Amino acid sequence: MNNYTEILRAHNLKATPQRLEITNALYTNGHMNIENLYAMMLEKFNSISLATIYKNINIMLEAAFIQEVKIPNAKSVYELTKASHSHAVCSNCGHIEDITLDLSSIQNTAMGITDFKIETSDLVFSGLCKKCQ
């Protein structure tokens, strides 16, 4: 098992029981939306509020400990921050997979045809996972 306390502290976050459990849930399950995370947290903390989940998620986002993945036409999901990557989302079952791609050529092309200095990019592919094909 990972030492989540040290990982949280390395991001200047207090290792509260709720943050430790959020970290464990995201480590175990990968991408999770707020509702699924809340349902899982209720099993361990029967009096936890949805507001507490949102507060902790926002604090962890600000510390760049977790990141939000915005899925078109769906609720955002959250994951532990890791190296830059893209996502493939199944349009049938909602399964999400990480894809490691070098987006630098796409960013350079986009900067060449716009007046933007692109700093970050998020790419989400939609389709059918192997199970749903």
Image (cartoon, grey):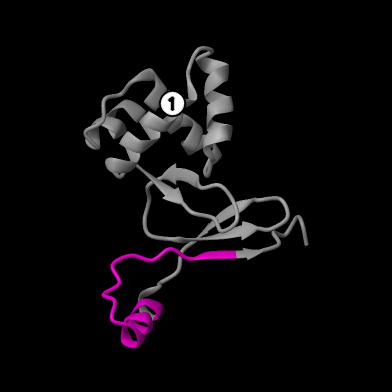
- State how many labels appear: 1
Q: Is residue 3 visible?
A: no
**Compared with residue 97, is residue 64 higher up or lower down, i.e. above or below?**
above
Q: As drawn, which residue projects farthest toward the bottom? A: 113
Q: Residue at x 37, y 30 (%)?
A: 56
Which quadrant of the rendered structure holds the C terminus? bottom right
In this image, 58 relative to 87: left or right?
A: left
Label 1 packing within 10 angstroms: few (<14), some (14-19), many (20+): few
Which quadrant of the rendered structure holds the N terminus? top left
**Nearer to us in this view, 47 or 98:** 47
**Compared with residue 44, is residue 12 higher up or lower down, i.e. above or below?**
below
Percent of width and height locating residue 13: 26, 30
Q: What amino acid type should be assigned to the residue bearing mark 1?
A: Ala
Instruction: Indicate whether residue 121 is drawn in magenta.
Output: yes
**Compared with residue 82, is residue 118 higher up or lower down, i.e. above or below?**
below
Residue 107: quarter of image: bottom left
Percent of width and height locating residue 113: 35, 87
Instruction: Indicate whether residue 16 is drawn in magenta.
Output: no
Q: Residue at x 30, y 72 (%)?
A: 118
Q: Residue at x 52, y 43 (%)?
A: 30
Q: Residue at x 54, y 13 (%)?
A: 46
Percent of width and height locating residue 51: 44, 26
Percent of width and height locating residue 79: 45, 44
Q: What residue did someone put label 1 on?
A: 51
Q: Secondary structure at mark 1?
A: helix
**Compared with residue 112, is residue 38 higher up or lower down, i.e. above or below?**
above
The span shown in magenta is 106-125
Q: As drawn, which residue projects farthest toward the right? A: 133
Q: Is residue 56 visible?
A: yes
